[in-house]
Each structure stands twice: as C-alpha cells, then as structure tokens.
Amino acid sequence: MRMRALLCSLLIAAVALVGCAGGQKVDTIKVGWFGALTGDQAVWGENELNTVKMLFEEYNAKGGIEVGGKKYKLEVIGYDNKGDAQEAVNVTKRLTGQDKVVAILGPNASGNAIPIAPILEAAKVPDIATVATNPKVTVMDGKVKPYNFRVCFIDPYQGAVAAGYAFDRLGARKAAILYDVSDDYSQGLREFFKASFTKKGGQIVADESFNAGDVDFRPQLAKIKAANPDVIFMPYFFKEVALSANQARELGITQVLLGGDGWPSEQLISMGGKAVEGCYFVNHLDYADPAVADYKARYKAKYGKDTELNGFLVHDAVLMLVDALKRAGKVDGEAVAKALTTTDIQGITGRIKIGADTHNPEGKDAAILKIVNGQYVFQEKYAAN
Amino acid sequence: MNQLLQQLVNGLSIGSVYALMAVGYSLVYSIMNFSNFAHGGVIMLGAYFGFFGLTLLKLPFAAAFILASVGTAVLATLIERVAYKPLRDRKAPFLYFIISAMGASILLENVVIATIGPTFRTYPEIFAREPIALGSLAIGRLDLIMFFVSAFCLACLILFIDKTRIGKAIQASAYNMKACALMGVNTDLVVLIVFALGGFLAGIAGVFFGMKYTVYPQIGNITTKSFIAAVFGGLGSLPGAVIGSVLLGVIETLVAGYLSSQFRDLIAFVILIGVLIVRPTGIMGKTAEDKA
C-alpha cells in the first residue's frame, strides 16, 4: 500500500515536470524601473513608466528582441519609491534580489539615483538614470561607478549653460539664486551656476534657500527683491517654481526668472501662468524637433495626454538598454553593463555616446527655451564654454 | 524698513493660514484632551471639495466655499463617529485616540491618492494675482481676503462659544465632561458639535490653502506646523491658538529674512522650545478651570 502511494506521487511529479518543460513559452527579459508614482513628481514617474510599457509592448508585438540568437520578450517591473532616497534603496534591493532584473531604468531624481550604487554593484545590475543630472550619480570621488549610467547631460554643464546664457545673451550682471537646500539636484545647479557666473565677471547678490515641502517663499523673495538682481535663477522643480514665481510677482518682482530642466511640465504653465511668462530655462531637447514628433504622437495616441520631458529621456534609455543587450549577446547584468560603456547610438534627444570614464553621454547640446504665451519657444542650441 | 514691513505682512499672512488650522486642534483638545491628527486629512479634503466644486460643478466661489466647509464638517463628525466614538464608549486610554487619529489621517491621504490621484492640482485663478501696492509694500489680494475671512470666522467662533447655550455646554464639557453629563447635558451631541465646528473651519482653511499653494494629498503634513503653533499658544485655548500661529508665522519670516533661510525652522523652533521651557502650558495656556 505504501509503495503504491509513493509510485503514484512519483508519477504525478513526473507528469508535472513534463508539463512544465513541454509548454511553449518565449523567455522574458525582466527590466526594472522605479521612480515616483506618488508625490510631487508623480507626473513624471507615471510618464516614464507609461513610456517604458509602451515601448516594450511595441517590441513584443514585433516578436521581441534577439539576444545571442534567441528571441526574448521584454517585461518591465515598476516600483514606486515616492521620490524618497531611502525608498529608492529598498526598491532597488527588491528589484535585484527578489525580481532578478537584468537592468534598471530610472530614477529621474539625482538624490534617488546616488544612494543605490552599492546595491547595483553587489548585484551586478546596471542602472540607466533618466533625468538625474548630478555628477555624483555616475562618478564619485573621481572614480566612475561601474553600474551607474545616465542618458542626460549633467549639472555642471546645465549650470554653466544657464550662467553663460544669462551673462552673454540676457546681459545680466547681477544674479540672485533661490534653491532647495534639501535636494542634490538643486544644490548642484546652484553651485555650478554660481561658479560660472562669477567667473564670467557677474555678481551673485542674493543666495537664498528653502526646504523640501515648503510652500511659502515670500520671506526669501522679499530679501531677493531688496538685492535688486537682473535675473533670478531658480534651479528646482516645476511645482515650487510655479509657487515661487507667483509669489515673486505678488511681491512686485518683475525680473526674468531662469531655470533648469526641472521646469518643463504642463503644470508649470497651468499653475504659473502669467508669472513665468517671458522666462527662460535650459532643457534637454527642443519639443518641436522633428526627431521627437513620432514618439510624441504615439504616446498621445496611447495615453490620451501629452508626454512630459521624462518620457523622451526614458525612451532613449530604453534604446540604450536594447542596444546594449543585443551587443552583450546574453541576458546578464555584468555583460550588459560592459556593453553600455561603449554605447554610441542616435536617440531622439540627440546622439548618445557614453564616455567610458564618466558613463555620461558626452557633448550633448542643451536647448534654451523661453515661455511665450504659455508655449515653450525654442531659442537656440547653446553649448557652454 | 520697507523690507521689515514687507516681511511682517508676509508673516501675518502665513500666520493666518496656520491659525485657521490650529483652532481645529485646540477645539478638539479642549473637549477630548487628545490631539486630533486626523484634522490634517480633513483640511486636505476641504481643499479637494473646494477644488471640485469650482472645476467640476462650476459653482461660484462663495458656493464652492460653503460646499467645502459643510462637506468637511460632515466628514469630521463622520470620523468622530467611526474612529473615536467606539473608543469613547469603551473609555479607552487617550493614547488609543491618538493612534486612531493617525490611522484616520493615513487612511484619508491614501484614499485620496487611490481615487483622485497622487499629483497636485491647481485652483482656477479667482482673485487677480496683481498685488495691492502701498508705496513699495506689496500685499496680495488673496492674502488680504484670507486674513479678513479668517479673522471673521475666528471671531464668530469665539462669540458662539461665549454667548450661545451650546457654547456654554461646550465650555462646561471642557471643564468636566462627566459632571456635565450628570447635569443632563447631552455630551455626545456636544462632542459632535465640536467636531463639526472644527471641520467647518478646516474646510475654510483647506480652500484657502489650496488657492494659495495648490491641492495635493500630503497637505496634511503642513498642519504639523499649525499643531505646533497651537501647542505654542497653549493647546486648548482658542485665542492662544490664533496668537501662537501668528507669532510662529512672523518669527519664521523674520528668521528667514534676516538671519538665514536655511536655518529658518531650526531657529524658529528653538525659540518655541525656549518659550515652552519658561511657560510649559504655552503662551495662553491655562489650567483646566477655563479651557475653551
């Protein structure tokens, strides 16, 4: 009787095993994504994840991608880190440890991309950050981080572009800065703006800060107003930009405001309205560039709303990853990271040629945009010298 | 001098927002002796009620305003019934009330994230953004309206509590709820009325906050500051809550304007702690005899 039961269970196990092996299924490549799906930057996180999903669906509809002579489907596993640095570390652990992804896309914020490096290195999983422009995302203490990459240009460059444009093109000689002291991105831009602007012979007449979560900037703005600058540099994100711009105008500040790539968003216009009219910001691309038109249309058709800036960059991050997977020839984080170091592709945001010792795309042009009648009007491609 | 005046105006305007929120904390504390941390969630929903009243229902401003305040008054009483009444009936320790309040606050925030969405929204522009200029002094129209509406509502509230029979019942319950019940006062109703009043003001605060700083699910976090202002002024005292709020607003702006914007919170709170060391019950804090 006992023997029989044992035989029975063996038989069942065997059938189950055969059933598994016999099933016709295409292997999938799991790719992680994380970013903010709640909080102030949720607009961007949602936009990134939607774009990755759309692109992966498009690849899969064409039968997937070929890696090392075998077809694979692409699957994205997306987590919300609420824009929080601690939570970024947690979700990275989960993606590498539990979900075993081959690579991670995102996050968009420097403050979230910087702390995840040790986990990536331990798990040998590469990450491509989207709009994380702080130098420390890929290079720390003069050493390149082996598993961190990015698809955007960096803060020194952005800060230098803003300072150069303000000094040379707008003719500003006195600048005031308001920045978010609790944010790596904002601090980075402020530092490099300050350095470039003073090097050119300009003067920083006010240098004020606020904390994340603040909604009232009038005390700082009143101080800036008293310093009477030619231009006010606001290197932070659109929500605070709109709030501080409105409050600046309420205090009777009429100067031109200048910002970085944290500005562009539909919300900036709807909320900032007249307050940001005539202001300038440094951006990664020109929205009217024919190269981006196709992606913009596909996104709008699928999701019924316009894509944000992040979508363009995560689009190119996906191109980078697919290219690296194909060249690596195997689904392995270490091999993909190695392939990423020699990336040289044409993305929709420009040519992406990764520098081996910086892991940044080298020599990407910045676009200067001006807000005119609630529209972003491309001024010129500007490279800082 | 001009900058000093401007900073004082800014401080008053920030303080008046804190005040509207702080009185809600003080009201409930005076009756129930616990800090109703769900108040932040009610304020947040007030901002959303007003927002949807204006955008979806296309109500005129005053109607949206009333809708929001009545909505939050109902909501606050609902929270009392669901989250606190069962605890009151069982005579639970006050710690449990605070935990229940925090639970309600987290619940409200997440329900909004799940249903309305996590992103922030912008009120339509109702008052022109151009400030009223007095010499080189600029005063926002919204700030001015906010200041007067807040002052009016707070005055009405204080009159209501001082002059009406219900107000007397509230005062008596604040003094001693058990004795009050023995004297035939329906203390259950008194508690409901207190929550409704706090909720009503929360709605007003929410709409103003939303108009000024946009609407988002984490508005509740801001109320931490108004709670601190209420403690500073003397928790349980309405005039104390108002004075504490205005002082906190002014201290914050002056510190940011003249010392360092980076250490604003640090310095402001060190001052507050200093005051509390000298006067542990807050500026207007009194003993149990004359709360509310």
Image (tube, coloured by chain):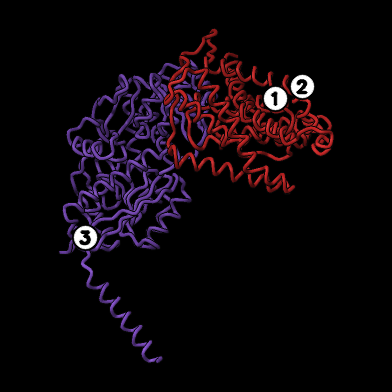
Chain colours: A purple, B red
- Dot 2 or dot 1: first in sequence order is 2
Could you tell me which residue is drawn at 38 percent across and 38 percent down? A43
Report how far apart the C-alphas of labels 2 and 1 lie in the structure. Answer: 18 Å
Q: Which mark is residue A72?
A: 3
Left or right side of B59 for B266:
right
Residue closest to the eye, A203 or A129 = A129
Q: Quadrant of residue A238?
A: top left
Q: Position of residue A246 (x, y in %)?
A: 45, 22
> The residue under label 3 is which amino acid type?
Tyr
Q: Residue at label 1?
A: B243
Q: Residue at label 2?
A: B162
- Is residue A203 in view? no
Quadrant occupied by the C terminus of chain A: top left
Badge 1: few (under 14), some or many (20 or more) residues near its Cα, within 10 Å? many
Instruction: Tell me: residue B203, above or below residue A294.
Output: above
Q: Position of residue B216 (x, y in %)?
A: 48, 34
| Mark 1 element type | helix
